[in-house]
Amino acid sequence: MSIDVNNESGTEVDEQAILDIARYALTRMRIHPLSELSVIVVDAEAMEQLHIQWMDLPGPTDVMSFPMDELRPPAKDDEEPPQGLLGDIVLCPEVAKKQGEDAPTQHSMDEELQLLTVHGVLHLLGYDHEEPDEKAEMFGLQAAIVDGWRAERGLTGPSPAPTVS
């Protein structure tokens, strides 16, 4: 899997963890190993510009996803996954830091960025959370992926609760 992480934010982030959890999520979702993903970390000003341009909403947000080839996980276990460009995930550490601090189970900016990376991957794969049933499915899958990744690394303590809306 080709995953590029490009930190343009000026904030130090755990790029390796973002790369690792993105790879874990894509593997768990059975995405073709030759697929490509780009993760860009930007400051609040750049994120606000993207948020206004693409969502017509003011202020910076935590994560945005820009799908390319609209890849989806295979429907059946024996189905061969398609190969292609997943797209871009854009993360904002300034928003992630605040969300981690304000969460019921306070956690670090890097833990929040890991959660947001999985959230962004799921959006690239067609998951959404507009309707209650969609939200339950997406957030359940997101928690399972984050928990699985943390367990594989022997990380203790509760996983960050979803803070994205």
Image (cartoon, rainbow, N blue to C red):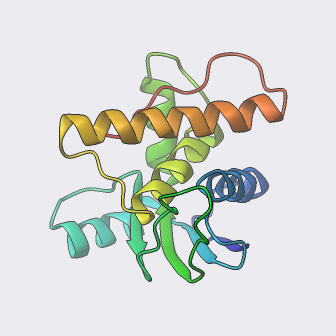
Which quarter of the figure has residue 4?
bottom right
Name the residue nearer the viewer: 47 or 149: 149
Residue 121, compared with residue 96, is above or below; it is below
Which quarter of the figure has residue 7?
bottom right
Residue 113, compared with residue 50, is above or below; it is above
Task: Name the image quarter holding the N terminus.
Answer: bottom right
Residue 16 locus on image (x, y percent):
78, 56
User: Is residue 8 at least partly visible in the picture?
Assistant: no
Residue 138 locus on image (x, y percent):
39, 42
Residue plotted at (54% across, 49% down):
118
User: Is residue 108 at least partly visible in the picture?
Assistant: yes
Residue 120, compared with residue 65, is above or below; it is above
Which quarter of the figure has residue 136?
top left
Residue 95 locus on image (x, y percent):
43, 46
Report the number of discs: 0
Residue plotted at (73% across, 58% down):
15
Residue plotted at (30% across, 52% down):
128
Task: Name the image quarter holding the C terminus.
Answer: top left
Find the residue positioned furthest to the right. 154
Q: Is residue 68 left or right of residue 111?
A: left
Residue 18 locus on image (x, y percent):
68, 54
Find the residue positioned furthest to the front. 78
Name the residue nearer the viewer: 44 or 160: 160
Residue 20, compared with residue 74, is above or below; it is above
Name the residue nearer the viewer: 154 or 95: 154
Q: Is residue 73 left or right of residue 110?
A: left
